[in-house]
Each structure stands twice: as structure tokens, then as C-alpha cells.
Image (spheres, rainbow, N blue to C red):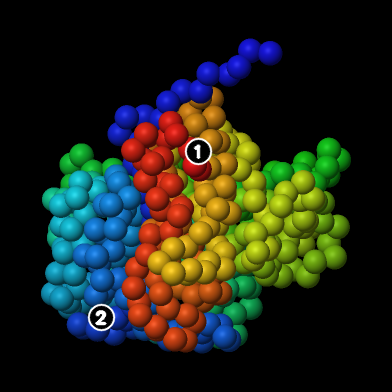
């Protein structure tokens, strides 16, 4: 059998990693920052508050220096809306502007490309009080925020991401602590998808504004994309997989790239009397967006079977990677062919390749991996963290990116989750993802010292060889 020759990674491939503001920065009410929804929500029992996190706010120089030591070509991070606009609108906080100026300049000092996410699960609490994404004015709030960012950072930031995992805000918003439903809501599905519509329009208008204000800059969405498998070859299961692919994946990318709603999902919304109301100009705004690339988070695939109506209408449940189903539409099932992480998420590297292939076939845009990674119980032993399980996970996924490149997909970079240990959205500090270990426990801040893990030293070699050497010697 002839051995397949893999194409090399592109020369300017963005090897790096990701974080989000509310999970890594700490200092959540410091230097004029206003509270976000994450600061006022009830923290899951047994997990730490978000007031310190990894304290990147006070350690950013040290942390970026460690990223440079690992050879990062890019660093994807988010800007906290309330650090820039404490009330979400109105007065700009100069200390917030200064902090991100410093972070961006520190990245550029080491030749690290800053890739900025504009919104990562942190709606200003003051805007939640005004109806959050359910308020039609939320489109203008977000565009105004975007304008402030482009004015202040557009001279140095050339890669922008709009909304992190918008599909997860829609599907499992309560788990993330971000979905704001009004009291006495009679049609939950309609309300959720109206909020989703406002996000789609806000994103589209921000993309147009970026192209207008920063010639040469590139901007794209950042959903969490997991190709959906049918549980069997039964035709009913195939339909269920198409249904969930439409609901989980294609709705968001069809809207971002083509400016239209996915037909399968729109029909489902019609059945539930839940189609969103379009304001004047919404349709045109969505059609005019034209993203330059697709950013996407990938952790695993999903598997579904036919749902006969036994699930209650409006019952979704689950988390980012484990759903329940939708009445008469699909139901989630375990894929017995895949192993699981310690936290119950399936591991599917080949599914990564499948997902990339499918996305490129549908959209023909360059793709940037904005998250991918393994959450685990890491332990500090002396000055070292031995995490061969993470190296194995990353090896297996990077191989599949190269396979996808060889299949013809255009890939811009790989920014796994996460650059540094941070607070997991609903599992606290104990679920660690980082290349850099932070010496703190759930409630004991200990030394807060930083240590590059074995995976970080391994990743350094991967970057040095542009992905040619993935061995773990």
C-alpha cells in the first residue's frame, strides 16, 4: 500500500493558544471595571469565584513572556466589555483601554500576533438589567463596543473574532451563566432565537464596521462546531443528524457567511411559532457582512438518533458538548466508539478532520482553530507538571489538521484551550487545560507561581518545526 504524503503546515501558520478575559484575568472590579454577568451569577457549588482566576491582570508580562518562551506565533484572548465600558454603554474607562494596549504591545514585542475575541460570555450586568440580547438595542450596544475597540486597537490588531460560541449561548446559555430570559416568558424557544437573531445582526454589523474602519484587517465568527454523526444507518437517524447539524452548526455559519438562515432550522422554528422578528435593515446587514475567515472551537463530535417525541418540548439541557435533544427533532446518544475525558467529554481526533472537511466544503473560507484541548486534574510535582495525556490529545488532533490540509482545507492556525490554567466555566480551577500551570487550588491561592508543563515544552518543539516533529521524546 502506497504511503500517503502529507502536505506541510503553511509557513505563517498561527501556532498559539487561547484564553478568555473572565476566566483568566481576575481583578474583576479593579481599575474601574464594571461587573459582567459572570461576576454577579451564582458560582457552581464547590468552585472558586472569578475575582482572582489566574490573575493575568497583574501577571500578563510574565505570562506573555512564557508564551514567547514556548515560541507562540499567536495569542487569542478576549477583551472584557465592562473593562472598556463599565456600564456596557456610555463612558469609556481609560484604565481598561490602557490594560489591553499593554497586553497587545507585550504580544507584539515578542512577535506574537494578537487575535482578539470581542465577546466571550461576559455581557455587562448593567445591560442584562436592560434586557440583555433580548433587547433590540443590544445590536447597537455591541456595534458601539466594536467601534471603541477598532478605534483604540485597530492600528495593531489585524485579526478579530466577534462572538465566542454563539451557538452555545443559544443551546446551553443557562449552563454558561449568560442566557437572560425575561420573567413570565411564554415561548422560551422564540425568546432564545430572538436573542440569537440580535447577536447575528450585531455580529454582521461589527464585521462591516471592521472592514470600514480597519482596511486590511480580518474578522470572523467563533462558534463551537462539532460535526454530528447519526447513531446508525437507519434513515430516521440520518435525518436526526441533519437536524442537529442544522441546529448546532450550520445555522450560525450559514448566517455569518451567507447572511441567511439555515432552511431546516427555520422550518423547525416555524413549527414552534418561534421565528425571530426582523427589524428594518436586518436582512441587508446580514447579507453585507462577508467574514474573512471562520474561527471555530472544536472539542469533539456529537452523535444523535431519531427522537419520537418523548422529550418534553423546550427541554434541551446538557453542557457545551453533551446535549439532551429536542422533541421530535433529535436525541443525543453516547458514541461507543470513542473514549472519554475524566470530565465525560468524548475524544474524537478523526472527527476533527471530518468537521474541518465539512466546513470547508460548505463555506470555502480559511479556518482558524480558536479552541481545542483537554481538561484534566494536573498535579505539580516539584517544579514540573507531567501531562502525557494532554500531549497525546494534542498530537492526535494536530495530525488530523495536517490530514485536513492535505485534503485541501485552508487552515490559518491552531490556538488550543488554553495558554494558561484558568477557571473552567462550570467546573472551576480543578479542571485544568493550560500549557502553563498556575500554583493555586480551588480556594487556596498558594504561591500563584507559573510553571510550563511538559506539554508546553513539547508544544515548543512542535512550533519550532512548524508541526513536522510531533514526537514526545
Query: As rendered, which of 142 and 101 lies closer to the eye?
Result: 101
Image coordinates for residue 209, horizontal then vertical, percent? 24, 51
357 in relation to 268, above or below = above
Query: As rendered, which of 413 and 188 lies closer to the eye?
Result: 413
CA–CA distance in space, label 1 to label 2: 44 Å
Q: Are marks 1 and 2 in contact (CB under 8 Å)?
A: no
Q: Which mark is residue 291?
A: none
Q: Which mark is residue 33?
A: 2
Q: Residue at x 21, y 54 (%)?
A: 107
Q: Residue at x 47, y 48 (%)?
A: 296
418 in relation to 82, above or below = above
Residue 342 lies left or right of residue 333; in this view the side is left
Q: Quadrant of residue 132?
A: bottom left
Query: In this figure, which residue is indicated by the disc labeled 1?
Result: 471
Image coordinates for residue 147, horizontal then vertical, percent? 21, 60
Q: Quadrant of the N terminus?
A: top right
Q: Say if residue 226 shows up in the picture.
A: yes
Amino acid at each position: 500500500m502506497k504511503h500517503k504524503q502529507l502536505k506541510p503546515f503553511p509557513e505563517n501558520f498561527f501556532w498559539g493558544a487561547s484564553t478568555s478575559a473572565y476566566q483568566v484575568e481576575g481583578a474583576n472590579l479593579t481599575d474601574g471595571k464594571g461587573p459582567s454577568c459572570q461576576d454577579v451569577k451564582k458560582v457552581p457549588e464547590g468552585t472558586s469565584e472569578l475575582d482572582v482566576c489566574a490573575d493575568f491582570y497583574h501577571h500578563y508580562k510574565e505570562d506573555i513572556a512564557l508564551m514567547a518562551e514556548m515560541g507562540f506565533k499567536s495569542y487569542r484572548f478576549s477583551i472584557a466589555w465592562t473593562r472598556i465600558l463599565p456600564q456596557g454603554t456610555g463612558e469609556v474607562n481609560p484604565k481598561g483601554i490602557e490594560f489591553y494596549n499593554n497586553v497587545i504591545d507585550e504580544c507584539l514585542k515578542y512577535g506574537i500576533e494578537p487575535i482578539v475575541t470581542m465577546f466571550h460570555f461576559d455581557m455587562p450586568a448593567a445591560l442584562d438589567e436592560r434586557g440583555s440580547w433580548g433587547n433590540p438595542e443590544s445590536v447597537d450596544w455591541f456595534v458601539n463596543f466594536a467601534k471603541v475597540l477598532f478605534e483604540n486597537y485597530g492600528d495593531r490588531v489585524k485579526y478579530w473574532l466577534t462572538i465566542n460560541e454563539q451557538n452555545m449561548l443559544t443551546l446551553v446559555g443557562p449552563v454558561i451563566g449568560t442566557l437572560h430570559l425575561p420573567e413570565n416568558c411564554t415561548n422560551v424557544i422564540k425568546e432564545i432565537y430572538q436573542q440569537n437573531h440580535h447577536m447575528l445582526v450585531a455580529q454582521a454589523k461589527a464585521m462591516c464596521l471592521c472592514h470600514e474602519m480597519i482596511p486590511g484587517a480580518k474578522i470572523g465568527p467563533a462558534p463551537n462546531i462539532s460535526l454530528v454523526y447519526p447513531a446508525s444507518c437507519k434513515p430516521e437517524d440520518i435525518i436526526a443528524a441533519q437536524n442537529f447539524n442544522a441546529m448546532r452548526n450550520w445555522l450560525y455559519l450559514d448566517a455569518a457567511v451567507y447572511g441567511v438562515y439555515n432552511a431546516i432550522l427555520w422550518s423547525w422554528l416555524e413549527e414552534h411559532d418561534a421565528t425571530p422578528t426582523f427589524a428594518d435593515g436586518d436582512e441587508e446587514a446580514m447579507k453585507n457582512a462577508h467574514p474573512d475567515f471562520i474561527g471555530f472551537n472544536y472539542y469533539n463530535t456529537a452523535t444523535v438518533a431519531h427522537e419520537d417525541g418523548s422529550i418534553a418540548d423546550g427541554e434541551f439541557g446538557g453542557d457545551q458538548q453533551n446535549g439532551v435533544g429536542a422533541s421530535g427533532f433529535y436525541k443525543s446518544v453516547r458514541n461507543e466508539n470513542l473514549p472519554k475525558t475524566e470530565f465525560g467529554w468524548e475524544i474524537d481526533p478523526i472527527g476533527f478532520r471530518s468537521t474541518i472537511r465539512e466546513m470547508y466544503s460548505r463555506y470555502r473560507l480559511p479556518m482558524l482553530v480558536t479552541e481545542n484541548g483537554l481538561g484534566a486534574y494536573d498535579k505539580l510535582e516539584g517544579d514540573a507538571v507531567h501531562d502525557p495525556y494532554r500531549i497525546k490529545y494534542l498530537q492526535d488532533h494536530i495530525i488530523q489538521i495536517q490530514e485536513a490540509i492535505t485534503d485541501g482545507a485552508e487552515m490559518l492556525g491552531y490556538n488550543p484551550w488554553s495558554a494558561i490554567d484558568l477557571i473552567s466555566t462550570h467546573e472551576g480551577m480543578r479542571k485544568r487545560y493550560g500549557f502553563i500551570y498556575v500554583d493555586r487550588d480551588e480556594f487556596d491561592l498558594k504561591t500563584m507561581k507559573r510553571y510550563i508543563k511538559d506539554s508546553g515544552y513539547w508544544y515548543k518543539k512542535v512550533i519550532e518545526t512548524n508541526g513536522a516533529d510531533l514526537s514526545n521524546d
